[in-house]
Image: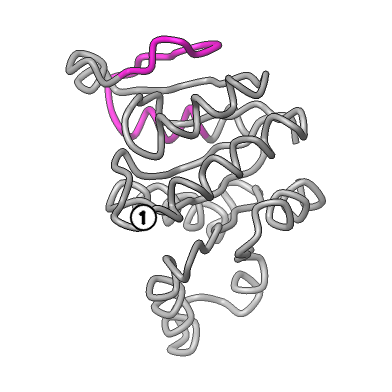
Amino acid sequence: MPNISVFCGSSFGVNPVYVESTIAFGKLIAEKGLTLVYGGGNTGLMGVLADTVLEAGGEVIGIIPKTLFERERAHQRLTKLHVVYSMHERKAMMDRLSQGVVALPGGLGTFDEIIEIMTWNQLKFINKPAGFLNVSGYFDHILAQINFAAEEGFVSKDFMDRIIVETDGETLLNKLMTLS
């Protein structure tokens, strides 16, 4: 798995553990020789993640919609930056450029992005390992909703077995790399 897409917040969140775990995860990406593919921003956890991977000697590919680029939210030191016209194009390009996907803590955009990838997997449009780095139980509620949907017959058991949830970044990356 040479490239990994990571979805995460453009804010820091209120718990310092989110920044700490993002830094640790960024170092792991670089140490394992993976290229980070992410949303191209310079703020919040997105900026921390990109900076960490770059400082650890890794490569970072950013993909940012033109409207965010024009608001000066683009990271200026990336290995490569793609400017696209929409969030839909951003997600599609991130998918094309990566062999695995991880969600770190984030807001509605992060939820949208990881759920869309999971949907594409369930519909068999793609076959890509996807996982959650469940820092301090951050994703417990959304995972409970997905499990409830499965219990109610809206998500298949087979698909549920493919969702990777870990609290340790190295364990998560190792599982993703094994499945890609």
At 54% across and 59% down in the image, what residue appears? Answer: 132
Tell me if residue 140 comes above or below residue 66 in the rendering: below
- Identify the element where label 1 is drawn: helix
Tell me if residue 171 comes above or below residue 11 in the rendering: below
Foreground pick, 47 / 66: 47
Magenta extent: 74-94
Q: What amino acid type should be assigned to the residue bearing mark 1? A: Phe
Q: Dot 1 corresponds to which residue?
A: 111
The location of residue 154, given as percent across then percent down, is 44, 79
The location of residue 64, given as percent across then percent down, is 35, 23
Looking at the rendered image, the quarter that the N terminus falls into is top right
At 59% across and 20% down in the image, what residue appears? Answer: 55
Within 10 Å of disc 1 (Cα), the crowding (few <14, some 14-19, many 20+) is some
At 54% across and 40% down in the image, what residue appears? Answer: 23
Looking at the rendered image, the quarter that the C terminus falls into is top right
Residue 80 is covered by the magenta coloring: yes
Foreground pick, 146 / 177: 177
* Residue reaching furthest to the bottom: 151
Q: How is the image coloured?
A: one colour
At 65% across and 24% down in the image, what residue appears? Answer: 56
The location of residue 157, given as percent across then percent down, is 61, 80
Q: In the rendered image, which quarter is residue 14 located in?
A: bottom left
Residue 43 is covered by the magenta coloring: no
Tell me if residue 27 comes above or below residue 77 in the rendering: below
| Picture mark count | 1
Q: In the rendered image, which quarter is residue 67 located in?
A: top left
Foreground pick, 111 / 47: 47
